[in-house]
């Protein structure tokens, strides 16, 4: 066993994972705000366990003093997408980022493994600020669809159970499952526009409902009880009818009343 301080060794990788997770989650939020749709569905990250690092080093013949360069995925970021086309867009975004350096890419979506594994891997060099200054660490960014991720998670669990020696029957069934997952991705891509329209419409409706109810509460704050009650009754009726257009009009009326209430409150404060 190597005698190094493993907590100290892994700290820059843990920092890199946490920083990159925040950055890609922020990117998702920004794209969603700008375009009403983000190719990133969600982001996860992890640092390899010491046992996994040692096992991979043994398997690849990496000397212990070369772990930082020989094991490229000690830090790992996983970006999940809804559609296969989203993978290419996310990869293009990663290539243009100024806060990391792309080392190389591995396209297992087009050139999938014999097992059926599909994912897009990007090895990047990411700088972290440590107590001793900047340190560049290698990290792997995996980009895949939800279906690809589901399959890969199952395969990983089975490989762990069988210690990387899957029975032929299980291996064959996994390969068929991988094809089924990819066919599902292709089918979802063929109706992409319909799916996105439905998601955007649902989110827009949810935002309107939240804003209406919040503004009605604000009217109570300004003691516009009668108006608040009337607006609540209108909301209940429109909600039952699932009338999104009517809810938009209602929101406009509420905001007009709120504006008057705020002006009236400001005038009272000035007079006081």
Image: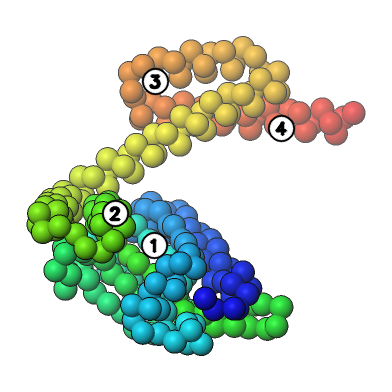
Choose the circle earlier in sequence order: 4 or 1.
1
Q: Residue at the location (57% across, 29% down)?
A: 214
Q: CA distance from mark 3 to mark 1?
A: 39 Å
Q: Secondary structure at mark 4?
A: helix
Outermost right residue: 272
The residue that label 2 is drawn on is: 161
Q: Residue at the location (33% across, 18% down)?
A: 241
Observer-nearest residue: 90 or 257? 90
The residue that label 4 is drawn on is: 263
Q: Quadrant of residue 104?
A: bottom left
| Numbered disc in front, either 3 or 1 | 1
Q: CA distance from mark 4 to mark 1?
A: 50 Å
Vertical comparison of 167 with 66: above or below: above
Q: Secondary structure at mark 2?
A: helix
Observer-nearest residue: 141 or 195? 141
* 243 relative to 183 in the view: left or right: right
Q: CA distance from mark 1 to mark 2?
A: 23 Å
Whether pointer 2 and pointer 4 mark residues with C-beta atoms closer than 8 Å, the reply is: no
Crowdedness of circle 4 by 10 Å Cα count: few (<14), some, many (20+)?
few
The residue that label 3 is drawn on is: 239
């Amino acid at each position: 066993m190597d005698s190094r301080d493993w907590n100290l060794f892994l700290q820059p990788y843990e920092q890199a994972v946490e920083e990159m997770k925040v950055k890609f989650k922020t990117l998702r939020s920004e794209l969603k705000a700008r375009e009403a749709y983000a190719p990133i569905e969600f982001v996860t990250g992890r640092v390899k366990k010491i046992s996994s690092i040692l096992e991979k080093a043994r398997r690849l013949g990496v000397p212990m003093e070369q772990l930082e360069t020989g094991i490229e995925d000690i830090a790992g970021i996983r970006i999940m997408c809804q559609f296969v086309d989203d993978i290419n867009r996310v990869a293009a975004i990663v290539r243009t980022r100024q806060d990391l350096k792309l080392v190389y890419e591995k396209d297992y979506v087009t050139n999938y493994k014999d097992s059926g594994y599909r994912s897009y891997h990007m090895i990047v060099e990411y700088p972290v600020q440590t107590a001793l200054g900047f340190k560049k660490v290698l990290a792997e960014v995996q980009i895949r669809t939800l279906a690809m991720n589901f399959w890969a998670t199952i395969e990983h669990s089975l490989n762990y159970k069988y210690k990387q020696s899957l029975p032929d029957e299980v291996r064959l069934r996994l390969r068929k499952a991988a094809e089924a997952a990819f066919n599902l991705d292709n089918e979802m891509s063929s109706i992409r526009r319909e799916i996105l329209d439905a998601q955007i419409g649902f989110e827009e409706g949810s935002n309107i409902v939240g804003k209406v109810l919040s503004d009605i509460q604000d009217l109570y704050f300004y003691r516009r009880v009668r108006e608040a009650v009337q607006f609540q009754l209108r909301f209940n009726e429109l909600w039952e009818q699932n009338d999104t257009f009517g809810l938009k009009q209602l929101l406009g009326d509420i905001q007009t009343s709120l504006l008057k209430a705020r002006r009236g409150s400001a005038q009272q404060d000035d007079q006081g």
